[in-house]
Image (cartoon, rainbow, N blue to C red):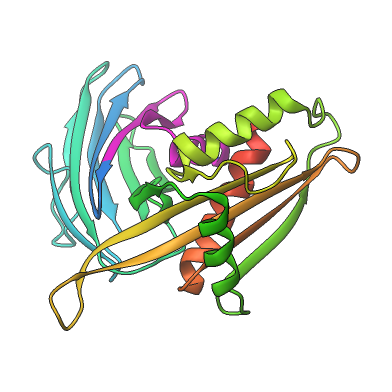
Amino acid sequence: MRKAFSNLCTSPSGVLFENAMLQVGVKHEYVGAQGRISVFFGNLHATALHNFKVKVDQPDHLRMQMQGTQGLIDDGEGDEGCSIENKTQAKMLLLVEVTAPFDDAPSMRITFETEEGERHDYPLRLPLVATCFMEPVNLDPGAFMQRWKSLEGQDRECQEVMRLPPNSSGIDEEYMSRVSNIIVNGLKFGRCEGVDPTPWTVSGAATFRTGAKDVNGNNINVGCLVRVEANPKANAFRVTTRTLHPLCSKAIKNVSLVSIKLAAL
């Protein structure tokens, strides 16, 4: 389940959860500070699932509108939920706008009962992370290093070293190509070529977009930089992020590390 969540953090669609009774699929897309997330709940059980409800956490940093199959969304008023017949789906649509940096994904709890009276409860997380709201920025080496140095400081930098699993195939240029693809297409950073004269480093820049306004009525955005440095001999990576907001730095670092690790499997 954790792998499915992590894959969806950098993929536009896929399966978030699946067992013998239920499949939860997600399709999501983002433009600037706004996102559209479709969630599908498929009944894989032999009989209908009753009193089916979904409760989604609504954190302060997200403006959220929800709609779905009648009775599906748990609004806390004690409704009976909906019924999903065998081999059919219920659907939920979330329209979101981010208003501030964050480093956690909103929770989604699914509850239902079978016709035999068995109660089921699945706590999940939606793959809605800070990197979903990035827009790539392309910088030449000089401009990147100038910004990198200007963002020095404990509250702006987040860094972690990660060793790949012993059963991984090791770090080679093909693996670094996959890492570059993760940074560009998964995290939506612009690849900054030529920053380092080595094939073992990937540098990128992006802007975290929000829908919040400053005193002048302009949208509040956060510039973000990332560097991924590989050490093939140690079979390890060092991920360093620098932004003006510590939650942005932490969020980018966390998504980068998990995605790089998954690329090795």
Quadrant for the C terminus in the image: top right
Tell me the magenta residue range. 2-29
Which residue shows up at 37% across the image and 57% down it?
207
Residue 255 in picture, x, y percent from top left:
54, 50
Q: Position of residue 37 (x, y in %)?
A: 25, 41
Tell me if residue 265 can be seen.
Answer: no
- Residue 181's place in the image compared with 192, above or below, is above
**Residue at the far left in the pictured view:** 70
Question: Looking at the rendering, which quadrant does residue 9 occupy?
Answer: top left
Residue 16, placed above or below residue 121: above
Q: Is residue 29 left or right of residue 64?
A: right
Which residue: 27% across, 63% down?
A: 210
- The image shows residue 67 at horizontal and vertical percentages of 11, 45
**Residue 186: percent from left, percent from top:** 47, 38
Give the residue at x 63% y 52%.
227
Q: Is residue 106 above or below residue 196?
A: below
Does the magenta-highlighted stretch encompass residue 22? yes
Residue 62 visible within the image? yes
Say whether residue 165 is magenta.
no
Relative placement, left or right, of 160 versus 133 is right
